[in-house]
Image (tube, grey):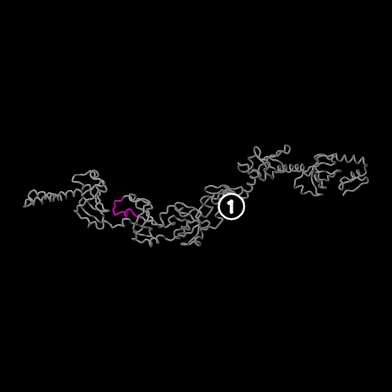
Amino acid sequence: MEEKNNNNVDLPDDQEDDSQAKGWAAAGEEDFARMFAASIEKTEEGQVIHGRIIKVLKEFVAVDINKKSEGMLPLEDLTEEERAALVPGAPIEIMTEGYDQSQGFIRLSRSKVVKIRVWDDLQKMFDEGVPVAGAIVGKVKGGYTVDIGVKAFLPGSQVDLRPVRDSDPIIGIQDKFKILKFSRKKANVVVSRRAYLENERDVHRKDILDNLKEGDVIEARVKNITDYGVFMDLGGLDGLMHVTDMSYGKVGHPVDLCKVGDLLKVKVIRFDRERGRISLGLKQTKADPWVDLESRFKLGMRVKGRVTNTTRYGAFVELEDGVEGLLHISEMSWNKWLKDPSEIMKAGDDIEAIVLKIDKENKKVSLGYKQILPNPWDELKIRHPEGSIVEGVVKNVADFGVFVGIGEEIDGLVHISDLSWNSRIKNPGELFKKGDRVQAKVLKVDPEAQKFSLGIKHLEEDPWAAIDKQFKKGDLISGKVTRVADFGAFVGIAKGIDGLVHISEISQEKVESPAAVLQVGQEVGTVVLGVDRANKKVSLSIRGYNDALERKDTESYMEKKNESSGDGIGVLGEALLAKMKAND
């Protein structure tokens, strides 16, 4: 409240100088005007004073500054936060900017006071080495601008612990900075975020070294990933998590389980305090699933799993977290000619399998897939008993035989020895090609050995079965040359049967090369020298055939001669017969 004196002059309630107040009250109008003007003149520009809010006007805030005239503080000089806190009677610190004679009040500023106080605070923080809070607001040549209440310069080398290549993520970072250089006079401030981070890292590192021990479970952030493991930041101190310590199961690559920046709970498994080396483990934070594996998985048990990877020899199946089983390619299909596991399954597939073997010591589980499928061998034996005739398509031709598909999962094999009764076949490709439709006889179905044997030659009678009755030693037979070799020539004497004329039996004269005197397709006469049914061999002689013809001609001649002479063959005839017998 203000009270009136005898001259009707308003006096402030908190007048500090009673003698001055009495002087003001006793003065006349002229003296009062002179004294008021003098008090205004004493209000210097740039003076920081403590005032009290009187009233908030449209554009100004009226402030009691303990002078004869109140001060006026422009609202635009205040921040939004300060405007919201304006309350009549509340104290406020301002700076005078001089007397506005046209308006009749003292001009005030709040922002200049704030700036002064900011510089005061920064000076103190610089002197004491205390970091200052701020935000990176822009990029300039050689670095960045940081708002710490005033504009400060942040060199590019002082942004982070590591070199920064991309400036876009830097703008907007709010953090603390250490003041490296400070000049209030030149309004020059240089700060470093790196120095602050290094100090925080050192403090945290010391705390870790002082308190960390083996067996502790801590949080660490993935810093870098390599083929052999993961480097993790414990907060100023690095630790290595080897790939073998990431999971109880098989890990193809560390990136399969984590990525840079991930925060993981890990266990300290080794700690060399002197060297500052820390070994970490992720799997050690969980119970080893292999310890009591046999209580959850039994031999012959049907289990579910997910294919994690396929290789040329099989597929790996995850049965549970940390436990993988191997499904070998031989256990995938009853068809043993399966070439690639991907023909049946691929990574990501959910499958069922049978537990075939558990090796807890070496942490291996063997699985079977074909065991959950009907055994096609058992069905094959029922549908196609031995001796039955089947028809199919040639699927493949090999050096040792021909594979024939008969519309079943399993292909039958016609061995080269079962293609023809003629054992001289050297290459099945001479007779068959892929896609040919053929008939065959089922020779054997062996589910245990997984053999399905077929025979094509068995569709006909074995021409060798009665060979010793069909041909006898001394028989004269003719046939065509089917093949010429260095040691002789083969002559077809019946369907599916070739006899061999050895080189020594081709001519009375010495023959150096059978091909010089015989050609394939040539018709020749032979005499049977021998028949070996067990080994399917018939020995022939062209030379003997010619001798036999000559003997027959001679005998015929002599018979005619004797008939004409009437009394014997004579001395010459006897001599010729003796010679032929000697040759025999």
Viewer-proximal residue among 86 and 569: 569
Q: Is residue 7 left or right of residue 249?
A: right
Viewer-proximal residue among 48 and 427: 427
* Residue positioned most to the front: 564
Q: Is residue 420 magenta?
A: yes
Identify which residue is drawn at 68% across, 44% down.
135
Q: Secondary structure at mark 1?
A: strand
Residue where numbered disc 1 is placed = 264
x, y percentage for residue 131?
Answer: 68, 45
x, y percentage for residue 486?
Answer: 26, 46
**Amino acid bearing label 1:** Leu
> What span is in magenta?
414-425
Q: Is residue 484 magenta?
A: no
x, y percentage for residue 335?
Answer: 41, 56
Q: Is residue 561 above or below residue 376?
A: above
x, y percentage for residue 516?
Answer: 24, 43
Viewer-proximal residue among 387 and 213: 387
Identify which residue is drawn at 64% across, 37% down.
142
